[in-house]
Amino acid sequence: MEIINAHVHAIDLKGMMTRYPDLRLSSGIASLSHLEQSLPLLDPAILLKQMDEAEVGQSVLFAVDAPIIYASNEYVAGLCKTHTDRLMGFA
């Protein structure tokens, strides 16, 4: 049986900085205190590697417009188009 992760986020860092140019992140954000844990959000190759390690066949990738986790519909669509066999977009 194939495992599907039904809720995954990515961060379009360049898009986030364009959308929120004055963004300043607080040091109290727990997910940013361990950058290693946030890398899969920034690098799709790391996400795919983690999926392989966990034997996840596909993931549903969500678009979101929020200051710390920003990924436009277009960004998500591009990732899904590049990895059609592994990522499904949800806008």
Image (spheres, rainbow, N blue to C red):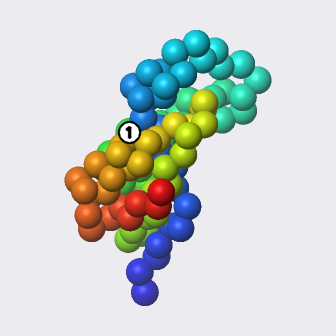
Measured from the top left, where is residue 6 in percent x and y? 53, 67
The answer to whether residue 90 is above or below residue 67 is below
Can you give x and y, in whole percent of width and height, for residue 3 in the image? 46, 76
8 relative to 56 in the view: left or right: right
Q: Is residue 69 visible?
A: yes
Toward which corner of the image does residue 53 lie, by quadrant?
Answer: bottom left
Q: Residue at x 60, y 37 (%)?
A: 66
Q: Residues within 10 Å of mark 1 (few under 14, many from 20)?
A: some
Say which quadrant the N terminus sits in.
Answer: bottom left
Residue that sits furthest to the left in the current view: 82
Circle 1 residue: 43
Amino acid type of the residue that numbered disc 1 sits on in the rendered structure: Asp
Q: x, y (%) of residue 84?
A: 26, 64
Q: Residue furthest toward the right? A: 28
Compared with 76, 29 (above or below) is above
Left/right of residue 64 with respect to residue 77 in the rendered view = right
* Secondary structure beneath label 1: loop
- Residue 8 against residue 67 in the figure, above or below: below
At horizontal 63% and vertical 15% (from top left) the residue drawn is 24
Q: Nearer the viewer, residue 59 or 77?
A: 77
Q: Is residue 10 above or below residue 42?
A: below
Foreground of the two, 65 or 81:
65
At x 41% / y 80%, what residue is drawn?
Answer: 2
The reply to whether residue 34 is in sight is: no
What residue is rendered at 23% in x and 53% in y? 82
Q: Quadrant of residue 55?
A: bottom left
Image spot of residue 14 (x, y percent)? 39, 25
Total label count? 1
